[in-house]
Amino acid sequence: MRIAAACARAGRDPAAVALVAVSKTVEVERLRAAVAAGLTILGENRVQEGADKRPLLDGATWHLIGPLQSNKAKRALETFDVIQSVSSVDLGQRLDRLAADVRAGERVPILVQVNIDEDPAKAGVLPSDAATLVAKLVALPRLEVRGLMTIGRFAVDADVSRATFRALREFGSTLRDAVPGLGQDLSMGMSDDFEIAVEEGATIVRVGRALFGERPHRHGDGTTDHVDG
């Protein structure tokens, strides 16, 4: 397995890396087969697609890995176990308020999306603003801030991707020292570069194309939406 091989090169335990199978546009029957084969964490870019699929599939944990609009926060909480793409105080506060009813008695696992490369085409909080954001999110009683997520650069040169992933790992370490309560997770790496991400410390990789084949990309608001690997 490629994740295990990457872990071996980095001296890491493969059990410390979770594989999110990105199920965007994949038919439910194929997903049932994938879950039966052991791909039990599924990731969707869009709230509605996840909401349509989840009732039809048993045995999976669902991650939202695409951008989340505030007006879809309630549906996201109803559909997804983990939300990986929180990047504003307003969204975090809305999730926290809604969770009192939608997920009563539990804390909602989230990741903070960081635009570590400061790429204007990508979503996520800028590194210069991340400490303030994370401190406010950690203080919300119904959210569990498990760590950070980023979208890597699209480059042929592996060293370019490595620089992004290393930067997030180092940034996360510094941020955890400054903001107690931030978790250890690092969600980074897709089909073309997940092995490099694992070598650089990823605890979650988001892989779609390498598992399910090529699928059409859909762009909504002009930002980069290539979180499907």
Image: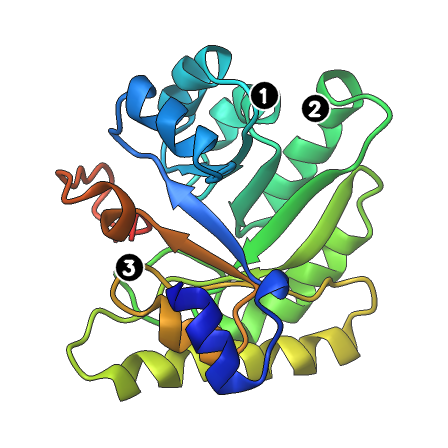
Amino acid type of the residue that numbered disc 2 sits on in the rendered structure: Leu
Left or right for 146, reference 51: right
Q: CA distance from mark 3 to mark 1?
A: 30 Å
Amino acid type of the residue that numbered disc 1 sits on in the rendered structure: Lys
What residue is disc 3 on? Answer: 191
What residue is disc 1 on? Answer: 74
| Residue 86 vertical position relative to residue 76 in the rendered view, above or below | below
Q: Which mark is residue 222?
A: none
Callout 2 touching callout 1 (CB < 8 Å): yes
> Residue at the location (33% across, 51% down)?
227
| Residue 60 percent location from the top left of the image | 54, 29
Left or right for 98, reference 116: right
Q: Within 10 Å of the Cα at label 3, are there few (<14), some (14-19), or many (20+) other Cα atoms?
A: some
Within the image, what quadrant is residue 159 found in? bottom left
Left or right for 135, reference 33: right
Q: CA distance from mark 3 to mark 2?
A: 34 Å
Q: Earlier in the sequence, mark 2 or mark 1?
A: 1
Identify the secondary structure beneath mark 2.
Answer: helix
Residue 167 in view:
no
Within the image, what quadrant is residue 217 found in? top left
| Residue 37 percent location from the top left of the image | 43, 36
Q: Earlier in the sequence, mark 3 or mark 2?
A: 2
222 or 41: nearer the viewer: 41
| Residue 38 vertical position relative to residue 20 in the rendered view, above or below | above
What residue is disc 2 on? Answer: 98
Q: How is the image coloured?
A: rainbow
Within the image, what quadrant is residue 182 found in? bottom right
> Residue at the location (77% across, 77% down)?
178
Amino acid type of the residue that numbered disc 3 sits on in the rendered structure: Ser
Tag in front: 3 or 1: 3
Q: Within 10 Å of the Cα at label 2, are there few (<14), some (14-19), or many (20+) other Cα atoms?
A: some
